[in-house]
């Protein structure tokens, strides 16, 4: 692994590992924010996942599952184990996270809207970095 990748991958992964641990620990507290998104996405996911795979049955379960994906994929990216797959998995987690937590278009006050928009754009930027990492053809 190149020197740049040795440092850049853990730097990129760190926010996902920490965020994933937080989601696992505080899933119930995060569930109300996630509920509008999980109610829409859960049926779409269930329709595409084989029935032998157990899926969460409540919003807190979906938050925990996403947190687990972030921790596992974040550790994989940080250590250079299957970095392209890990980056793609992390990018996929950004869609529900960003839509649930940073829907700036739903904010009424200008300050709240500006803060949510900043966080939304930060997540879009992180997703772009993950997409680049997912197509990095340099050997691990």
Image: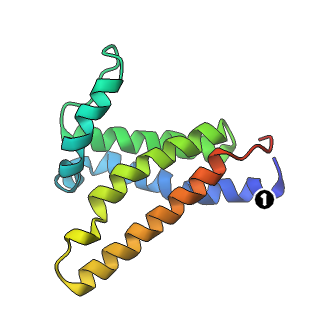
Picture coordinates of residue 105 (x, y %)? 25, 70
Image quadrant in which you'd find residue 135: top right
Bin the neighbour count of mark 1 within 10 Å (Cα to Cα): few under 14, some 14-19, many 20 and up: few
Q: How is the image coloured?
A: rainbow
* 34 is higher (above) or lower (below) than 59: below
Asked whether, in this view, residue 46 is left or right of residue 76, the answer is left
Helix, strand or loop at label 1? It is: helix
Between 124 and 23, which is closer to the camera in this rendering?
Answer: 124
60 over 114 or under it: above or below: above
Residue 92, given in percent of the width and then of the height, sits at 45, 45
What residue sits 60% from the left and 40% below the top? 76
Q: Quadrant of the C terminus?
A: top right
Q: In the image as oriented, which residue stretches furthest toward the right?
A: 2
Could you tell me how many numbered marks the image carries? 1
Q: Dividing the picture into quarters, in which one does residue 103 lie?
A: bottom left
Q: Is residue 43 above or below residue 100?
A: above
| 135 to the left or right of 64 | right
Question: In percent of the image, x 33 and y 79: which residue is there?
Answer: 115
Residue at image point 76% right, 43% down: 137
| Place of residue 5 in the rendered image (x, y in percent of width and height, measured from the top left) | 75, 54
- Residue 65 image-quadrant placement: top left
Q: Residue at x 38, y 67 (%)?
A: 120
User: What residue is pinned by disc 1?
Assistant: 4
51 left or right of 69?
left
Q: Which residue reaches farthest top?
A: 52
Residue most toward the bottom?
110
Q: Nearer the viewer, residue 121 or 81?
A: 121
- Residue 7: % across, % down: 72, 58
């Amino acid at each position: 692994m190149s020197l740049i990748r040795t440092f850049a991958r853990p730097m990129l992964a760190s926010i996902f590992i920490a965020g994933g641990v937080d989601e696992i620990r505080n899933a119930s507290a995060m569930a109300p924010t996630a509920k509008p998104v999980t109610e829409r996405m859960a049926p779409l996911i269930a329709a595409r996942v084989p029935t032998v795979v157990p899926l969460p049955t409540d919003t807190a379960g979906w938050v925990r599952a996403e947190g687990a994906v972030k921790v596992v994929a974040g550790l994989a990216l940080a250590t250079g184990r299957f970095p392209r797959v890990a980056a793609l998995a992390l990018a996929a987690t950004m869609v529900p996270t960003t839509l649930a937590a940073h829907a700036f278009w739903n904010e009424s006050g200008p300050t709240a809207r500006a803060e949510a928009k900043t966080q939304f754009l930060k997540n879009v930027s992180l997703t772009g970095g993950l997409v680049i990492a997912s197509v990095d053809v340099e050997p691990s």
